[in-house]
């Protein structure tokens, strides 16, 4: 039988590698799914491993590719996620998995070769409940290169270590995450009402219960950015909208970094209105913002093509304005719905299933 969560070795060089379960929520991921799973199966890790893919109602070839992966490797299996929602997919995959370490990966995330081995070592060394690292955005064309540059710059995302890098240490949240199963059982998994920001919300609960979230730059996951301005805008609007829900649900969870985008949206909107109706001097606010993101795009775009560099200000403005707009327009009814539910899905009994 595999070791239970409480049996996890504390020696950073365990005699027998701890078995791990890799969980992956997917929806319309035909472009990257096979590559993402290959990066998992080719990990430099000697312990037992399983991959559980939670299938949403995709409209592309995702299900067909997943079925091929199951036939090709006995370590891979699938579970249904009829809602298509990420937190429901994660809970379904956790329930169907069985090992004491749970590694979350997305369908467009590519793990570095030693990711799992490093994460298991860090869990043992730090005593953390969850460890994670850098969301290494990397594009496949000029627009995606521009978005990747914006997402890994401080002018784009502030001082979030999992975007921009930094020293290893305790963190509010991390990208994806490698968990001790006991932490997921104690918190009863992801709150399925959080369509977005479910990682941040779960990590907040773990920290509130006294658990440690640990960031390490040793852990890197290659991430593919959204392929269009429209898709990026929707992504960041949803981020802002649901981050405001977290702030309402968990008092004290907000800080100045999260207030910067909505403040910028208000200031720019006020400057434009005042500039048109009152005095052109008010236009200095939106003009100053444009100048700032243009200047900030220069170091962010180092080494990229001219076409990509020219699109970085567009990516930055899309991210900032969409996040801020989503935060400002987040309906209070969402928070009431979340607070009324308060019942995530994972239980200790669920996780005993083979």
Image: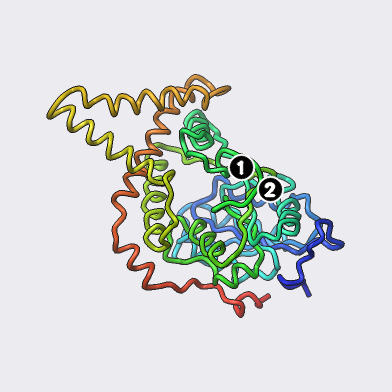
Residue 344 rendering spot, x and y as whole percentages: 49, 71
Question: Which quadrant is home to the C terminus?
Answer: bottom right
Foreground of the two, 92 or 329:
329
Looking at the rendered structure, the secondary structure element under dot 2 is helix
Residue drawn 18% across the image and 33% down it: 273
Looking at the rendered structure, the secondary structure element under dot 1 is strand
Residue 72 rendering spot, x and y as whole percentages: 71, 57
Comparing labels 1 and 2, the label whose residue is closer to the camera = 1
Residue 68 seen in render: no
Residue 69 rendering spot, x and y as whole percentages: 65, 56
Q: Which residue is mark 2?
A: 39
The answer to whether residue 269 is above or below residue 219 is above
Direction top: furthest residue: 306
**Circles 1 and 2: CB atoms closer than 8 Å:** yes
Q: Give the distance between the C-alpha atoms of the residues marked 1 and 2, in whole angstroms.
A: 10 Å
Foreground of the two, 156 or 48:
156
Left or right of 145, for residue 270: left
Residue 82 rendering spot, x and y as whole percentages: 46, 66
Q: Which residue is mark 1?
A: 222
């Amino acid at each position: 039988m595999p070791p239970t969560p409480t049996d996890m070795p504390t020696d950073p060089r365990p005699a027998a590698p701890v078995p791990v379960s890799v969980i992956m929520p997917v929806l319309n991921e035909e472009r990257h799914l096979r590559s993402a799973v290959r990066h998992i199966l080719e990990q430099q890790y000697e312990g037992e491993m399983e991959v559980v893919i939670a299938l949403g109602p995709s409209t592309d070839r995702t299900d067909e590719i997943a079925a091929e992966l199951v036939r090709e490797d006995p370590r891979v299996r699938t579970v249904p996620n009829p809602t298509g929602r990420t937190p429901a997919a994660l809970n379904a995959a956790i329930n169907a998995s069985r090992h004491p370490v749970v590694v979350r990966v997305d369908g467009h995330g590519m793990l570095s070769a030693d990711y799992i081995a490093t994460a298991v070592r860090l869990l043992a060394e730090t005593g953390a409940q969850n460890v994670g690292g850098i969301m290494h955005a990397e594009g496949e064309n000029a627009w995606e290169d521009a978005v990747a540059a914006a997402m890994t710059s401080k002018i784009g995302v502030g001082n979030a270590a999992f975007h921009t890098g930094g020293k290893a240490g305790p963190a509010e949240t991390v990208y994806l995450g490698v968990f001790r199963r006991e932490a997921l059982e104690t918190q009863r998994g992801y709150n399925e009402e959080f369509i977005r920001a479910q990682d941040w919300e779960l990590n907040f609960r773990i920290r509130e219960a006294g658990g440690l979230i640990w960031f390490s730059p040793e852990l890197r996951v290659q991430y593919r950015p959204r392929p269009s301005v429209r898709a990026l805008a929707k992504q960041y609007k949803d981020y802002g909208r649901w981050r405001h829900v977290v702030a309402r649900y968990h008092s004290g969870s907000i800080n100045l970094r999260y207030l910067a985008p909505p403040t910028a949206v208000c200031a720019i909107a006020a400057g434009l209105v005042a500039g048109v109706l009152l005095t052109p001097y008010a236009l200095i606010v939106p003009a100053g913002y444009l100048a700032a993101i243009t200047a900030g795009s220069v170091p962010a775009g180092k080494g990229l093509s001219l076409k990509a560099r020219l699109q970085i200000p567009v990516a930055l403005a899309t991210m900032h304005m969409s996040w801020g707009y989503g935060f400002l327009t987040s309906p209070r009814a969402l928070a009431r719905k979340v607070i009324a539910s308060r019942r995530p899905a994972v239980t200790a009994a669920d996780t005993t299933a083979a």
